[in-house]
């Protein structure tokens, strides 16, 4: 098929880390993934434990043999690259470095991170801190791991809810553009107030993103429905198509050839791999069905 007609083909989930790397990979296999996301470390701890290299090698070989790619490492939730507090900001930089090192060791292509809060210091000050942190971390790192800035849910003082804020960060570091990208979380942008309840509205959102950031810099989509209202600044993830967003947005996204390069990672509610398998089957079934 000519490239321009290719559609997104990589669909995965955030696999739980209980039991270690190989158990997570097995979860992804059981769920029917061909892409994967994991936490880079304990999601509620500052200090990470480096994964053993032999385990990383085993994980990487098995993942590639099963054609599960890319692998995205999600940084712990404590990270705050926008913080005006030097102590927190320095620990957050270290956390990003640690995640990049886990990615390098484990052969993972992406590190996905929440950006953080300006903690009352104002959006411009927060953005300046983020730019400074990314510049320092990425200029000192010679790997090809790509850092993805995830859209946030519009609550409080969080940086990165609006596409304009993400564009400002990326545009400040043009020499690092090959090392940075954006992850759109559908539940988060819905919470911020980007209407994606219809096909038309979803196309308009993509157009706005393309104008401000560029679809070539969209490297991942977290595909989640939301139980909360549009613009409610709150996200409680729901099964694909069964929340307040509904199926229309997901049908548009998986059928857009401009997103053929984008992996879709589901962070939907789950008790076991069968729950993930059901949501993956649903989103895949939306292809060629607009
Ligand atoms: Zn996230
Ligand atoms: Zn997400």
Image (tube, rainbow, N blue to C red):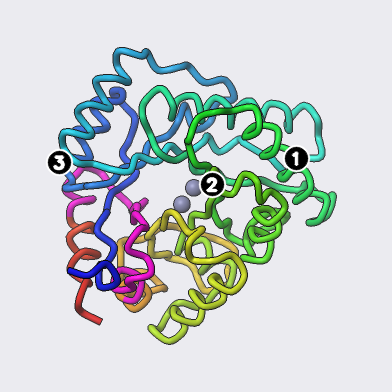
Could you tell me how far apart the alpha carbons at marks 3 and 1 are, in whole angstroms?
Answer: 41 Å
Give the image quarter of residue 224.
bottom left
Q: Quadrant of the N terminus?
A: bottom left
Magenta residues, as a range?
A: 252-277
Q: What element carries label 3?
A: helix
For mark 1, does the 10 Å Cα neighbourhood hold few (<14), some (14 to 19), or many (20 or more) residues? Answer: some
Q: Which of 228 and 210 is in front in this view?
A: 210
For mark 3, does the 10 Å Cα neighbourhood hold few (<14), some (14 to 19), or many (20 or more) residues? Answer: some
- Give the image location of residue 97, x and y in percent: 58, 27
Residue at the spot of label 2: 178
- Which numbered disc, 2 or 3, marks the residue closer to the eye? 2
Q: In which quarter of the image is the C terminus?
A: bottom left
Residue at the spot of label 3: 30
Using residue 14 as the reference point, say whether residue 287 is left or right of it: left
Q: Is mark 1 on a helix, strand or loop?
A: helix
Which numbered marker is on residue 132? Answer: 1
Could you tell me how far apart the alpha carbons at marks 2 and 3 are, in whole angstroms?
Answer: 33 Å
Furthest residue to the bottom? 200
Residue drawn at x 57%, y 20% is 47
First along the sequence among labels 1 and 2: 1
- Give the image location of residue 232, x and y in percent: 58, 69
Using residue 82 as the reference point, say whether residue 99 is left or right of it: left
Furthest residue to the front? 2
Q: Nearer the viewer, residue 240 or 204?
A: 204
Using residue 288 as the reference point, say whether residue 141 is left or right of it: right
Residue drawn at x 62%, y 34% is 138
- Give the image location of residue 48, x and y in percent: 52, 21
Q: Which of 206 and 153 is in front in this view?
A: 206
Is 262 within the magenta? yes
């Amino acid at each position: 098929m000519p490239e321009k007609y290719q559609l997104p083909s990589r669909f995965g989930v955030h696999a739980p880390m209980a039991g270690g790397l190989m158990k997570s990979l097995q979860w992804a296999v059981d769920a029917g993934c061909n892409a994967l996301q994991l936490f880079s470390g304990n999601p509620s701890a500052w200090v990470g434990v480096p994964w053993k290299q032999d385990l990383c090698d085993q994980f990487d070989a098995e993942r590639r043999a099963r054609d599960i790619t890319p692998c995205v490492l999600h940084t712990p939730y404590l990270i705050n690259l926008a913080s005006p507090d030097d102590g927190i900001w320095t620990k957050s930089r270290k956390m990003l470095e640690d995640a990049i090192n886990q990615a390098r060791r484990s052969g993972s292509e992406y590190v996905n991170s929440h950006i953080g809060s300006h903690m009352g210091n104002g959006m411009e000050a927060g953005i300046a801190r983020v730019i400074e942190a990314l510049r320092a971390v990425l200029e000192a790192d010679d790997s090809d791991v790509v850092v993805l800035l995830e859209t946030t849910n519009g609550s409080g003082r969080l940086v990165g809810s609006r596409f304009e804020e993400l564009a400002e960060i990326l545009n400040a570091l043009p020499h690092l553009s090959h090392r940075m990208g954006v992850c759109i979380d559908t539940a988060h942008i819905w919470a911020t107030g980007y209407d994606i309840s219809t096909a038309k509205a979803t196309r308009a959102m993509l157009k706005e993103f393309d104008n401000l950031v560029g679809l070539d810099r969209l490297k991942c989509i977290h595909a989640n429905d939301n139980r909360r209202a549009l613009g409610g600044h709150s996200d409680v993830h729901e099964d694909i198509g069964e929340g307040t967003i509904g199926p229309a947005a997901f049908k548009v996204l998986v059928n857009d050839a401009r997103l053929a390069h984008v992996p879709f990672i589901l962070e939907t509610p789950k008790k076991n791999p069968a729950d993930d398998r059901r949501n993956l089957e649903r989103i895949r079934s939306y292809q060629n069905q607009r």
